[in-house]
Image (cartoon, rainbow, N blue to C red):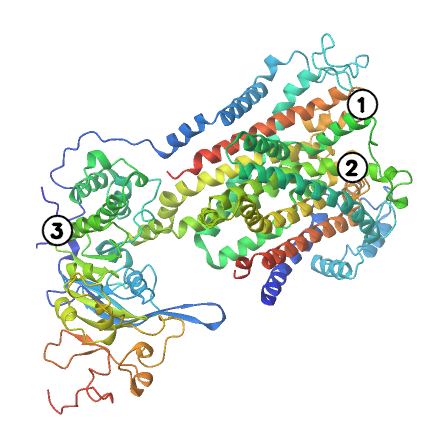
């Protein structure tokens, strides 16, 4: 039997053209003692279309997880707007509680995400009970979802988290995220802690669920292969900013931003005849407390020039006619002053 | 490092203020007029008012507090109602006496406690461990004033080896470091040492077991470090916390000595405190508690600083 | 894909076979506890003492307050006085049995009350954090700055003698200690992922506390509280020993030690008996508490 999972009042309010999620200039800084500030997320702009999967990649400290938490409103943003299906989150148009029925998150640590004192089915049923579903109905729903994610309810529903393996727990977390019938699911390194074979199974599960329920995913990971497998579009972050965003195959085949290029070429090659030889990234790993002026990547960039240290490059569409790709690099911005920038044209 | 020191001291100030406020308020939460202990029962109203003015009880509370605190900071803790002598002097003398047995007790407790704790932790799970742990639990569970009584029964009444109480012939004023006098110290100190011994034993046992469990120990052994080297390593890692606990125990003993000093009639702060309570000698009560509490607060700060010196991880907090 | 109601009860229920039930957390604790022989023995002793206190009327051979000037300070084994007679000629055995009532009560009551108040304060401070936490915990620190004995005596001394005042002082001594543990544990739990996930599901603070925090927090706090019982007993009887607690002629172990103090020269072993009772009870509670902590220590 099929289980349809949409929230009834969330019929496509915005229509097919409206992105499901729009982040505009999201900013979140964390003050440390003594005036220093961690600029975890700085002016991040992106959107996620309905039914697509946006992969988010970057090194540790680049702000991926903070962005995820801001999108889930677990941390409120300092500046910037968050629009869900065209409505601003947290306003009268869309209350926080209603938003939370439609957007859910799966965390990295499968064990820490589950209350060790609750049975699996209780954990999964918790969300619906918060929104008014009677306990018995919530439990039934929980059991069906467990079956959906591949865990036989007869064997697992009354168990405790510590009795399950990592992969099984992550399936539970996925079931829990789906319990509220969301439209958007954010997966923050959801498969990173699993063994490779288990990871493959869970990824396939995620793909199947997406298909069946028409979900939209934001998939955060540091594993570029996994991101390639599951995403439609990819967003690359560096030091709290978006440096490149575009369709997955295009981006992987032809990375435009020097950082993206470095990331991709740093992937160990799967082909023994084509081994990766050098480590392309030079310089120190970044510190989000005192990010460099201008383009934040310029200290490590092999193509850096004076303009890069002075002016921050905006995230603009590339000059070829696609428009789907945006890059924040002076080499792509016409008339930026970089020697490799395309020339300014008077008309399109 | 200096900032850590400064932070610790600054942190202590509001606590110290709170503590002194509490000591001050103690007198006023006592049921009845604070004046009753001072007044002769047939005092006239005029006399009451007069005395009230002398003691400052007619002023508003915050003012009283301010004055009392100001005086205290200058070393003037008022005059004892019972003896008529300045409180500060009495307390000072008593503190010295208590420190004598408390220090001895802490040292004994630390030595034996560490020994038992170490043995228990090192040979974890063995019979030795069970035995040492049992001793530790015994130490912590025994009512120490009763233990004092038992010690007196055994060593004074039955065996006659040690005196049952007091501070020696001539009292504490005529103290000399000879057997006649020191023999009076032994029973109280040993009795006092039992609880710290138990606590230190338990703490050290947990520390040692923890350290030995950590992964760098097999690494050390793999490097070829002989057992003595590992032993030294464990000591180095356990020392800061163990010393901190010892310092705190000294503080507890100083503050909590009243029961044992009552049993042994040892003229220390506890004894003084007991008298103050029974004679409703409020200035003496206030002054003694204030000094003891401040000692404890100060000791805490010193222990914190010492930990910062010995264990660099603490400083970063 | 069409949007349909999602949060309603599904129309066709899945027939689920009987569930494989796993033993819950507490049955696991009980199982581990049973294996610890020392803890079980201690538990039995505590139970016996409690029963003795409850059924004192049936167990005591004589009236604990009946004194006899002729039969003062008789040794153990005197006919009619199995454990001797005290300084007023009263039967020690009966007084010890009846004394269990007050001594136990004064040990357990302050801890229990402090558990309730301390937990509320600590959990609130830990959960809500921020400035509220700072204010509350600093205030707690002020009380923590006193050694417990000193605080108990200072409070008792100020309030005056009597059972009620003693219990009040001891409760005030223990509340900060429990509040501290409560705050520490709650802060840990609060930052756990599952609490964040609960928030992400739209749950409010009250629901989160009830469902997720309490279950994980009360256990450790409770274990800590049980370790305070023996301290409370010793302090309470200590207060009586100083004359600040129970008043004569009520039988209570600490008070008995006080009145028998001078008797140590005449009948030392009789004089020491009440302390033995305190000692045994205190050790048993401690071992019980230790056993409980070990049993609860394992994950899940």
Query: How many residues crowd around disc 2 within 10 Å: few (fewer than 14), some, or many (20 or more)?
Result: some
- The answer to whether C291 appears left or right of C97 in the picture is left
* Chain of residue at mark 1: B
Q: Is residue A236 left or right of residue A215?
A: right
Residue at the limit of the structure toward the bottom, as seen here: A346
Q: Which residue is mark 2?
A: B186
Chain designation of label 3: A
Closer to the eye: label 2 or 3: 2
Observer-nearest of B83 and C78: C78
User: Could you give the CA–CA distance between mark 2 and mark 1, rounded to whole angstroms?
Assistant: 17 Å
Q: CA distance from mark 2 to mark 3?
A: 79 Å
Toward the viewer: A189 or B76?
Answer: A189
Considering depth in this image, is A142 or B61 the residue closer to the camera? A142
Q: Secondary structure at mark 2?
A: helix
Q: Which mark is residue B158?
A: 1
Question: Helix, strand, or loop for circle 3?
Answer: helix
Q: Quadrant of the C terminus of chain C?
A: top left
| Any part of residue A125 in sight | yes
Q: How many other residues sit within 10 Å of disc 1, few (<14), some (14-19) or many (≥20)?
A: few
The residue depicted at 59 percent of the width and 58 percent of the height is: B308
Please identify the quarter of the rendering in which residue C243 is found: top right
Instruction: Identify residue for label 3.
Output: A208
Place of residue A138 in the rendered image (x, y in percent of width and height, measured from the top left)? 23, 41
């Amino acid at each position: 039997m099929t289980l349809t999972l949409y929230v009834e009042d969330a019929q496509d309010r915005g229509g097919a053209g409206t992105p499901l999620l729009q982040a505009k200039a999201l900013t979140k800084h964390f003050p440390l003692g003594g005036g220093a500030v961690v600029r975890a997320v700085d002016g991040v702009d992106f959107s996620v279309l309905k039914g697509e999967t946006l992969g988010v990649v970057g090194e540790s400290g680049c702000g991926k997880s903070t962005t995820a938490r801001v999108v889930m409103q677990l941390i409120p943003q300092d500046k910037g707007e968050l629009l869900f299906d065209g409505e601003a989150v947290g306003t009268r148009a869309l209350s926080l509680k209603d938003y939370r029925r439609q957007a859910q998150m799966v965390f990295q640590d499968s064990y820490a995400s589950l209350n060790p004192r609750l049975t699996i089915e209780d954990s999964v049923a918790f969300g619906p009970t918060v929104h008014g579903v009677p306990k018995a109905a919530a439990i039934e729903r929980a059991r069906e979802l467990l079956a959906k994610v591949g865990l036989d309810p007869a064997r697992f529903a009354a168990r405790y988290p510590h009795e399950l393996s990592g992969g099984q727990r992550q399936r539970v977390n996925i079931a829990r995220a789906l319990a509220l019938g969301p439209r958007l699911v954010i997966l923050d390194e959801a498969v990173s802690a699993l063994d490779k074979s288990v990871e493959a199974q869970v990824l396939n599960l995620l793909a199947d669920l997406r298909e069946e329920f028409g979900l939209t995913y934001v998939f955060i990971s540091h594993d570029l292969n996994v991101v390639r497998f599951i995403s439609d579009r990819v967003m690359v972050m560096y030091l709290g900013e978006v440096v490149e965003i575009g369709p997955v195959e295009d981006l992987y085949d032809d990375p435009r931003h020097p950082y993206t290029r470095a990331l991709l070429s740093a992937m160990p090659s799967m082909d023994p005849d084509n081994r990766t030889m050098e480590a392309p990234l030079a310089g120190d790993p970044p510190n989000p407390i005192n990010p460099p002026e201008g383009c934040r990547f310029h200290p490590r960039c092999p193509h850096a020039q004076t303009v890069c240290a002075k002016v921050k490059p905006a995230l603009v569409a590339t000059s070829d006619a696609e428009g789907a790709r945006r890059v924040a690099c002076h080499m792509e911005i016409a008339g930026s002053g970089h020697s490799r920038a395309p020339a300014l044209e008077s008309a399109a | 490092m200096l900032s850590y020191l400064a932070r610790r001291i600054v942190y202590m100030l509001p606590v110290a203020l709170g503590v002194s406020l509490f000591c001050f308020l103690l007198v006023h939460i006592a049921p009845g007029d604070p004046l009753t202990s001072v007044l002769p029962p047939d005092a006239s109203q005029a006399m009451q008012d007069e005395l009230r003015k002398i003691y400052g009880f007619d002023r508003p509370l915050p003012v009283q507090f301010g004055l009392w605190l100001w005086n205290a900071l200058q070393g003037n803790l008022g005059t004892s109602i019972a003896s008529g002598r300045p409180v500060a002097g009495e307390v000072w003398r008593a503190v010295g006496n208590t420190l004598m047995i408390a220090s001895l007790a802490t040292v004994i407790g630390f030595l034996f406690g560490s020994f038992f704790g170490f043995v228990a932790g090192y040979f974890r799970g063995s019979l030795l461990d069970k035995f040492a742990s049992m001793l530790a639990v015994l130490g912590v569970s025994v009512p120490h004033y009763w233990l004092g009584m038992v010690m007196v029964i055994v060593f004074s009444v039955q065996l006659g080896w040690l005196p049952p109480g007091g501070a020696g012939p001539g009292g504490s004023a005529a103290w000399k470091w000879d057997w006649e006098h020191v023999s009076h110290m032994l029973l109280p100190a040993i009795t006092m040492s039992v609880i710290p011994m138990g606590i230190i034993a338990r703490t050290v046992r947990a520390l040692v077991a923890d350290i030995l469990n950590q992964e760098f120990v097999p690494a050390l052994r793999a490097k070829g470090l002989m057992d003595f080297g590992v032993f030294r390593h464990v000591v180095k890692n356990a020392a800061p916390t163990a010393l901190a606990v010892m310092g705190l125990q000294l503080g507890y003993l100083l503050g909590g000595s009243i029961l044992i000093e009552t049993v042994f009639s040892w003229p220390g702060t506890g004894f003084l405190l007991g008298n103050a309570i029974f004679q409703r000698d409020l200035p003496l009560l206030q002054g003694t508690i204030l000094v003891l509490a401040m000692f404890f607060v100060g000791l805490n700060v010193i222990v914190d600083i010492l930990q910062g010196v010995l264990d660099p991880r603490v400083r970063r907090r | 894909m069409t949007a349909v109601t999602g949060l309603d009860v599904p129309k066709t229920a899945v027939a689920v076979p009987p569930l494989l039930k796993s033993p819950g957390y507490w049955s696991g604790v009980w199982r581990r506890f049973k294996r610890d022989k020392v803890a079980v023995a201690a538990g039995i002793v505590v139970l016996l003492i409690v029963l003795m206190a409850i059924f004192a009327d049936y167990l005591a051979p004589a009236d604990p307050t009946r004194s006899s000037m002729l039969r003062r300070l008789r040794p153990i084994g005197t006919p009619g006085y199995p454990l001797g007679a005290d300084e007023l000629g009263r039967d020690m055995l009966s007084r010890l049995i009846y004394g269990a009532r007050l001594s136990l009560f004064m040990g357990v009551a302050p801890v229990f009350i402090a558990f309730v108040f301390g937990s509320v304060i600590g959990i609130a401070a830990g959960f809500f954090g921020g400035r509220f936490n700072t204010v509350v915990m600093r205030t707690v620190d002020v009380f923590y700055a006193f050694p417990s004995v000193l605080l108990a005596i200072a409070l008792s001394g100020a309030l005056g003698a009597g059972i009620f005042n003693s219990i009040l002082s001891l409760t005030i001594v223990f509340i900060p200690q429990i509040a501290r543990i409560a705050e520490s544990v709650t802060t840990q739990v609060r930052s756990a992922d599952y609490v964040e996930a609960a928030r992400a599901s739209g749950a409010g603070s009250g629901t989160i506390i009830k469902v997720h925090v309490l279950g994980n927090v009360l256990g450790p706090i409770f274990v800590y509280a049980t370790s305070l019982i023996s301290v409370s007993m010793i302090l309470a009887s200590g207060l009586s020993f100083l004359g600040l607690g129970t008043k004569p002629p009520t039988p209570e172990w600490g008070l008995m030690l006080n009145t028998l103090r001078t008797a140590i020269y005449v009948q030392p072993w009789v004089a020491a008996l009440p302390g033995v009772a305190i000692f045994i009870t205190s050790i048993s509670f401690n071992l019980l508490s230790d056993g409980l902590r070990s049993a609860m220590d394992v994950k899940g």
